[in-house]
Amino acid sequence: MIDMKKVKHILISRVDNIGDVILTLPLAGILKQYFPNVKITFLAREYVRAIIERSAYVDAFYGWDALSAMDQSDAIEQIRSHAFDVVIHVLPKKQIGILMKKAHVPYRIGPSSRFYYWLTCNELVRFSRRKSDLHEAQLNLNLLRPFNIELSNDLNYLHDRMGLKPVEPLPLHLQSILKPDKFNLIIHPFSNGHTREWPISHFIALINQLPRDKIHVIISGSQKESEAIQKGIMTQCPDVTNISGMCNLREFIQLIGHADGLLANSTGPLHIAAVFNIHTLGLYPITKGIDPNRWAPIGKKVEYLTADPKCDAPSCRDKNDCVCMESITVEMVKDRIMSWL
C-alpha cells in the first residue's frame, strides 16, 4: 500500500485517444476527493490536451509527444525534475514503464497482466480487461487499489468525478454554425478507423430523411476525413453544414457543448457530448470488448443502438465493412433522434 504521508505529486499516464482519456479522468477526481492537497499531473498525447486542461481535478498536463522524442537520458532527467511520487500506468506502455523506473519514481502502479510491469513497477494490480464485463471507466478503478480508499463503480458517480468545466461562449467565427431556431444535430460519421462504423450510405439516407424545418445537420470530422466527407456525403446532402477539418479540438469541444445533440460511432466526440449532457446517440457493434457494455459514453442523456445480437457474420472479425453494423437501420436511428425534439 502507498503511504500517502509521503506523496505530494501523482502522475496518471494514458497516452491514447479522446474517449480513453475521458474515461480515465475519474481517477483524478477520486484522488482529489480523498487527497485534495496532492498535485495531479496527466501524461498524454498533445492531441488531447484540450480535454485534460478542462478537468478541474487535473493540475498539470505533461506532453508525451515531446517526452517520447527525447533521448532516454534527457527524458529521465526531465521526469526527475517533476518529482513525481506516484505514477499510475492506465494504458500499458513498456517505454513509459522503463522511464519511470529509471527516473526512480517511488511508487509505480501497473497491471500485473503485462510482464514488463513485473520488472518496472513495485505496486502490481491483478485484473483483466479482456475477460471482464465491466465498463472501461470501472476497470480503471482497479489501479487505485494501492491507495486503500473506498471506491464506487457507479457510472453516475464516475461521470461527476470527471470534473470537466462548462464550455465558454462560442467564438464569433463559430456562432454562425448553429441555428437558434432549430435543433442543432452534429453527425460525426467516421472514427479514424478506431471502431466498426455505420455505413456511409445509412448516414446519407438518415440525413435526407430528417426534417430540415426542425433539424439543422452539422457534419464533423478530422482534417484527414474531410475529403471523404466532401466526396462521399456532401455531394448527396448539399444542404447541410460541413465543418470537417475546420475546428481544432478546443473549438470542437465548445461547439459540441453548445449543440443540442450528437450522433456518432464509438469515438471521441461521443464521449465529449455525453460529458456536457447534450443528447448523445452512439452506434455500436456487439463484439465483446468494443461493445457499449465496455465503451458506452457516460452522461445523463446518453443512448445507444447496437447491431443485431444474432449476427455472426465472419466479415466483422477482420473488416471495417461490418454486416452487423448495417443491421442498425436508418429508421431506428431516425426514431431516436426525432424523440429528442
Image: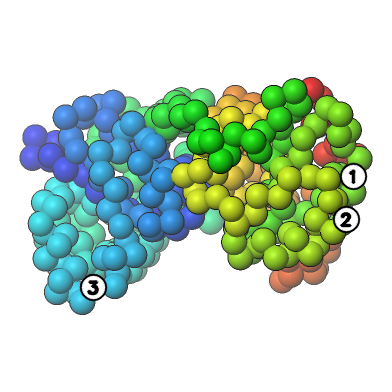
> Residue 127, position in %: x, y?
42, 51
Q: Quadrant of the C terminus?
A: top right
Q: Amino acid at mark 2?
A: Gln
Q: Residues within 10 Å of mark 1 (few under 14, many from 20)?
A: some
The residue shown at (83%, 27%) is 214
Q: Earlier in the sequence, mark 1 or mark 3?
A: 3
Q: Amino acid at mark 1?
A: Asn
The residue carrying mark 3 is 70
323 vs 239: above or below? below
User: Which label lies toward us, 2 or 3?
Assistant: 2
Q: CA distance from mark 1 to mark 2?
A: 9 Å
Q: Amino acid at mark 3?
A: Met
Is the C-beta separation of discs 2 and 3 under 8 Å? no
Is the C-beta separation of discs 1 and 3 under 8 Å? no
The residue carrying mark 1 is 208
Looking at the image, residue 175 sits to the left or right of residue 100; the answer is right
Q: Residue 236, which numbered label?
A: 2
Element carrying mark 3 = loop
Is residue 219 in sight in this rendering? yes
